[in-house]
């Protein structure tokens, strides 16, 4: 599986701006591979609906049918796997017309809703996590930086490099320590108070 995918096609971005598709994509990123049946159980939807959305994601290059299912898997079922571990885009990656603008707005709204659902689940369940996990979680809100567009772009590049560095570092570890999936979300945009 490759790193993050840079999305430059409005149709592909719109395909990912669907709540169930986003959930299925990230479920596959976390699982590595799965069947529509297994994914349907995890998202509490019908297998036929999940299969349809998996095909749409594959049509836009986010998933692929796994040519080699996991060892011991039922070979009669189609196994899916993600082609990347995430995706990114900027408005300038897409055309400047209304189609690109609509795709960006829809994707941003769905991405915000997706992250908010995970954040709410964390808030509701954090008492059941250890003190170490509660203390390690963080939230930051820093509206005080004054930047030029070029500085914000440079910040974004450095942030992506930092994430790749940590992803590589963690992928190389097999130490058996307690590890959980951690969602990192950064939003950076200009505003006027």
Image (cartoon, grey):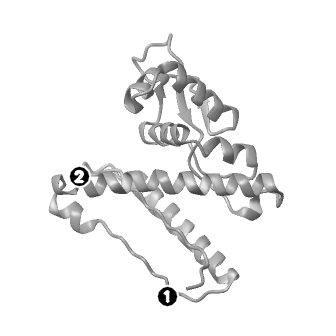
User: Is 74 drawn above or below residue 82 in the view shown?
Assistant: above
Residue furthest to the front: 193
Pointer 1 residue: 144
Disc number at residue 125?
2
Q: Is residue 179 visible?
A: yes
Q: Is residue 63 left or right of residue 98?
A: left
- Establish if 109 lies above or below 162: above
Residue 158 spot, x, y in % from top left = 57, 73
Residue 113 against residue 139 in the figure, above or below: above
Q: Is residue 93 left or right of residue 178?
A: right
Element type where label 2 sits in the image: helix
Pinpoint residue 75: horizontal percent, then vertical percent: 49, 13
Q: Residues within 10 Å of mark 2 (few under 14, many from 20)?
A: few
Structural distance between the alpha carbons of marks 2 and 1: 31 Å
Q: Position of residue 26 (x, y in %)?
A: 48, 43
Identify the residue at horizontal 47%, vertical 31% (top origin): 33
Which corner quadrant of the image does residue 59 belong to? Answer: top right
Specify the quadrant that holds the N terminus: top right
Question: Can residue 5 be seen at all in this image of the molecule?
Answer: no
Point out the image quarter for the C terminus: bottom right
């Amino acid at each position: 599986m490759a790193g993050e995918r840079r999305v430059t096609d409005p149709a592909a971005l719109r395909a990912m701006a669907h709540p169930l598709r986003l959930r299925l994509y990230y479920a596959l990123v976390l699982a590595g591979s799965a069947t529509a049946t297994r994914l349907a159980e995890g998202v509490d939807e019908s297998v036929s609906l999940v299969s349809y959305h998996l095909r749409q994601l594959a049509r836009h290059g986010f998933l692929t049918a796994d040519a080699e299912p996991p060892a011991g898997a039922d070979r009669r079922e189609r196994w899916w796997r993600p082609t990347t571990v995430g995706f990114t885009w900027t408005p300038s990656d897409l055309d400047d017309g209304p189609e690109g603008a609509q795709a960006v707005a829809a994707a941003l709204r769905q991405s915000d809703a997706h992250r908010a659902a995970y954040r709410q689940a964390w808030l509701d369940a954090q008492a059941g996590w250890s003190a170490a996990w509660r203390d390690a979680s963080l939230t930051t809100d820093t509206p005080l930086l004054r930047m030029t567009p070029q500085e914000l772009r440079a910040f974004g590049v450095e942030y992506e490099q930092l994430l790749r560095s940590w992803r590589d570092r963690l992928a190389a570890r097999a130490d058996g320590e307690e590890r959980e999936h951690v969602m990192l979300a950064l939003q950076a945009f200009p505003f006027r108070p």
